[in-house]
């Protein structure tokens, strides 16, 4: 079953002007700073921006990672 996140570019129109590489770099930076909510938004957009299956798979894995981290923080 394919992952279909909501179209977040409606709320963050600046993401439409960013390349996949720029989005993923920003998402990884957010992860480094433990800002998983921001990283989740960026990875969701990276999924939409990706053209290669490999990049889509990476985005899905990172989305799952961010969701797990957010849930872990909520339980603390």
Image: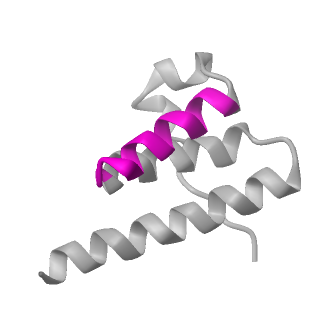
Q: In which quadrant of the rendered image does the N terminus lie? A: bottom right
Q: 33 or 11, which lies in front?
A: 33
Query: Magenta includes 33?
Result: yes
Residue 62, placed above or below residue 21: below
Residue 38 location, x and y as percent? 35, 45
| 19 relative to 73 in the view: left or right | right
The answer to which image quadrant residue 49 occupies is top right
Residue 60 location, x and y as percent? 64, 63
Residue at (55% x, 35% y) in the render: 25
Query: Magenta includes 36?
Result: no
Q: In which quadrant of the rendered image does the C terminus lie? A: bottom left
- Give the dominant element type of the magenta stretch: helix, strand or loop: helix
Residue at (54% x, 49% y) in the render: 43
Residue at (67% x, 31% y) in the render: 21
Tally of marks:
0
Q: Which residues are magenta?
A: 21-35
| 38 relative to 56 in the view: left or right | left
Q: 25 or 63, which lies in front?
A: 25
Residue at (48% x, 21% y) in the render: 13
């Amino acid at each position: 079953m394919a992952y279909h996140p909501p179209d977040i570019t409606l709320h963050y129109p600046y993401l439409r002007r960013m390349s996949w590489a720029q989005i993923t770099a920003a998402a990884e930076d957010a992860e480094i700073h433990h800002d998983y909510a921001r990283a989740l938004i960026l990875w969701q957009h990276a999924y939409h921006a990706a053209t290669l299956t490999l990049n889509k798979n990476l985005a899905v894995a990172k989305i799952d990672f961010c969701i797990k981290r957010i849930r872990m923080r909520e339980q603390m």
